[in-house]
Amino acid sequence: MSAAAEHRDFNRVFRLLDANGDGVITRPEVEAALEVLGRAISTRDRAGLLELVDGHGRLTRDAFVGWMAQRQDIDVMADLREVFQLIDADGSGKLSVDEFTQIISCLDTPLGADAVAALIRSADQNGDGEIDFDEFIRTQVSTSALRVSVVALRTLKKTLLQYRQVAESSSVVLVEIDSELGAGRRGQAGGPAALRDAALQKQSALMRADNGVLSRDSLRVQTANWAQGAGYRHRHAKYIDKLHRVLGDTRDLVADALRAGQFPIVLGGDHSTAAGTIAGIKTAFPHRRLGVVWIDAHADIHSPHTTPSGNMHGMPVAIATATDNLAERINDVDADALDLWARCKALGLAHGANVSLDDLVYVAVRDTEKAEDHLIETHTIMNLTTDTVRALGAEAVARRCLDRLEGVDLIYVTFDVDSMDATICMGTGTPSPHGIFLEEARLLNETLVRDPRVCCWEICEINPLLDVVNTTVENSLAVYQAVVDTVMRRKPNGRPPEIRKQPTRNNADGTTA
Ligand SMILES: [Mn+2]
């Protein structure tokens, strides 16, 4: 939302609280406002607002709007509008009495049917039998029994969105990106095919044509691996001129799949393409807050300024979070590479970052460099280590990831097979000791994708050329199958989900139906 629109909305909140319209609200009204905003306000901010109340117990509009504007996480109007739109199924901009009753029943208010009927009569101020957005807002501030906290509102919004997503993700689609330009060595491009072949060979029940997973052609991104013959032009961001296109194509395929209501399972080559996948999710859902679970031995958060190798598979997190980390700069990057770097970061959202560093969780990351450690420490990025997985169990670690991402609307899970221990994962470009074991990887991913907010899953960095008796491919397949199975089970049997709790109806004779 633009600053001006935000300002208008803050003014609007103020006007709704300022019942007599004299440009100031009294202390009881300030307290009512705090109640509306609910637990989303920290104790410090709460105290800060009360401090702005002057000696006469009054708060001016400017002071209130100024206070709202410096609070980043409060966007009450946007939340209310989203809930309004989610419930306004026919998109008319007005809620019917039925739709309005539905909201109230979802909110678990103590209101009986009579009170609801009275509320509808008072909400519908122009008496047209429908409740528009302004009338809806007014019920929020005028009816104490209905006053909804931001937290309750966001919970409701999330529930509605989840149901909608489950309903829409009725099928799984494979997106194959056999690109290896981002890796330091060749072979990653064979990963997706090796996985698919292993699956077909096994005649796995999951992969049979009748369940729709492999019955249609998987989507395939046009890659540029041929460019390896000619060499790279930018040494601090190798093949960025080619990868920029691969990322753009990845974004388009992933966005198309999501828009079509499908769940993309991305079979990646090297991990750089994850930046394209994330851009695709943001392209399909630009207004949803996206969280990322990054399961990997590496943090992949280098920029061209900090990378020792120039390999772009070490940069997708930096691209997705628009992190340059100039404080740890060791390279002089040429202008052309910087321009391409800026264009990579702008895939998905044109401005800002696709993912906030606050909404990133690492699992099993253990092979990092100083520049990356600096970011992890200064931004206190959560890293659930192999030791943590071993101590708590993979299921508990998955739940910890989901708890950390409690505030996000959508989640992307990316599984770099080198997160697994080097002893069971030689077939990858950069194997790393002290990783998670197969059973842990399987349970971790399976538990994560059970959350209906997870909208896309990716597996990458399988290098069949380096594999030993196909161990990595087989282990990867086991994780992959567990994920597909779980996602397919999420499918709601083609039935539209129930989002409404039936309100209790009072019969005319006083009994309840
Ligand atoms: Mn990686």
Image: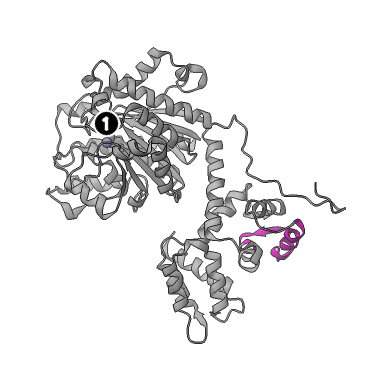
Is residue 463 shown to the viewer in this render?
A: yes
365 relative position to 201: left or right: left
Horizontal side of 267 relative to 297 (left or right) equals right
Give the image quarter of residue 395. Answer: top left
Question: Residue visible at 43% across and 44% down?
Answer: 402
Q: Secondary structure at mark 1?
A: helix
Q: Main secondary structure of the magenta part?
A: helix
Q: What residue is rendered at 26% in x and 36% in y?
A: 297
- Residue 248 visible? The answer is no
272 or 422, which is in the foreground? 422
Position of residue 360 relative to residue 40, above or below, is above
Q: Is residue 347 above or below residue 28?
A: above
Locate the N terminus by quadrant. Answer: bottom left
Percent x, y of residue 482: 43, 26
How would you rate the neighbour count of disc 1 (Cα within 10 Å): few for under 14, some for 14-19, many for 20 or more? Answer: many
Q: Position of residue 322 (x, y in %)?
A: 29, 50
Give the residue number, with chain letter if any, for mark 1: 418
Query: Between residues 506 and 21, which one lies in front from this camera angle?
Result: 506
Residue at the (21%, 39%) spot, across then down:
367
Q: How is the image coloured?
A: one colour
Asked whether mark 1 and ligand 1 are closer than 8 Å, the reply comes as yes
Q: Amino acid at mark 1?
A: Asp
- Of residue 156 and residue 249, the one placed in the foreground of this image is 156
Assign ligand 1 to one image quadrant.
top left
As drawn, which residue projects farthest toward the front?
391
- The residue sitting at 17% across, 47% down in the picture is 370
155 on left or right of 353 = right
Q: Nearer the viewer, residue 88 or 501?
A: 501
Left/right placement of residue 15 relative to residue 247 reads: right
Q: Quadrant of residue 437?
A: top left
Q: Which residues are magenta?
A: 113-136
